[in-house]
Image: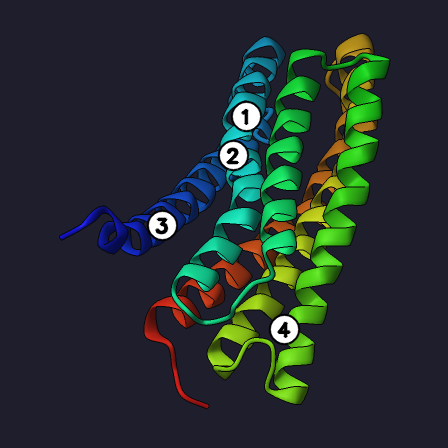
Amino acid sequence: MSLGDLAYPTLVYVHLLLFVLWLGADVGVFVLGQHFRRRGDYTLEQRIALLKLLVEIDMVPRSAWALMVPLSLSVVDMGNWWDVPIVLLAGAWIIGLFWLWLVWDSHKHDMTPRAARNRAIEGWLRWLIGGFYLWLGGQSLLTDGPLMPDWLAWKALMFGLIFVAAIMIDVSFKPVGAQLAAVMQQGSSDETEIPLRKTMDRTRVWVWAVYILLMITAFLGNVKPVF
């Protein structure tokens, strides 16, 4: 088998690997979040340690998400599912790698104006990329192009919906910073803990939405059902 013959299955393998890392690490984040909520079982210091570990593990799905964008288009192009314009493919890799840099630079400089700037840019990127995948899937289902098989069009549409749900996780989770600061400054009590718990409960709805959409996307990509 030549290097050319290995290229496509290797891309598919990396694509699947990113999916496993994304979903697997995200489940780890979810479990840590569940334990953080159990204030009767852990001291405040232990719960803060769990939260720090959660943030570290969360870097895995965030990184996989950024890389999934250029990789998905590369798989589609190399698999002859769509002759992706070279400008779009190159742009996807530039944007994906830039997004990955934003994720890690924000993590390194957390709680600084630099991180806030990076996350604002990242937010715009996610909406734009999510909108692109929603358009790509919807357009293909309506007009049979540029993605010809319906399963692939549905997969693109599901990926766009994953963007929406994942963005809503961050939106729902945003009040946690101030609420967690109140817990640390004023101590653990119903007054400080209940608002934090409610915010985490609202966020869980979108977390489950991402899990379900990821499962559907994986099913479509592997089974390739004929509609």
Q: Nearer the viewer, mark 2 or mark 4?
A: 4
Residue 190, position as x, y percentages in the image? 77, 28
Q: CA distance from mark 3 to mark 2?
A: 27 Å
Q: Are marks 2 and 1 in contact (CB under 8 Å)?
A: yes
Count neighbours of disc 1 (C-alpha within 10 A) and say few if under 14, some if 14 to 19, many if 20 or more.
many
Q: Which residue is mark 2?
A: 29
Q: Which one is earlier in the sequence, the residue at label 3 or at label 1?
A: 3
Kind of residue indicated by mark 4? Gly
Q: Which one is earlier in the sequence, the residue at label 2 or at label 1?
A: 2
Q: Nearer the viewer, mark 3 or mark 2?
A: 3
Residue 221, position as x, y percentages in the image? 40, 67
Q: CA distance from mark 4 to mark 3?
A: 21 Å
Q: Which residue is mark 3?
A: 11
Kind of residue indicated by mark 1? Leu
Callout 3: SS: helix
Callout 1: SS: helix
Callout 4: SS: helix
Q: Which residue is mark 4?
A: 137
Kind of residue indicated by mark 3? Leu
Q: In this view of the protein, which residue sits in the foreground, 184 or 97? A: 97
Q: Which one is earlier in the sequence, the residue at label 4 or at label 1?
A: 1
Question: Which mark, by number, is residue 54?
Answer: 1
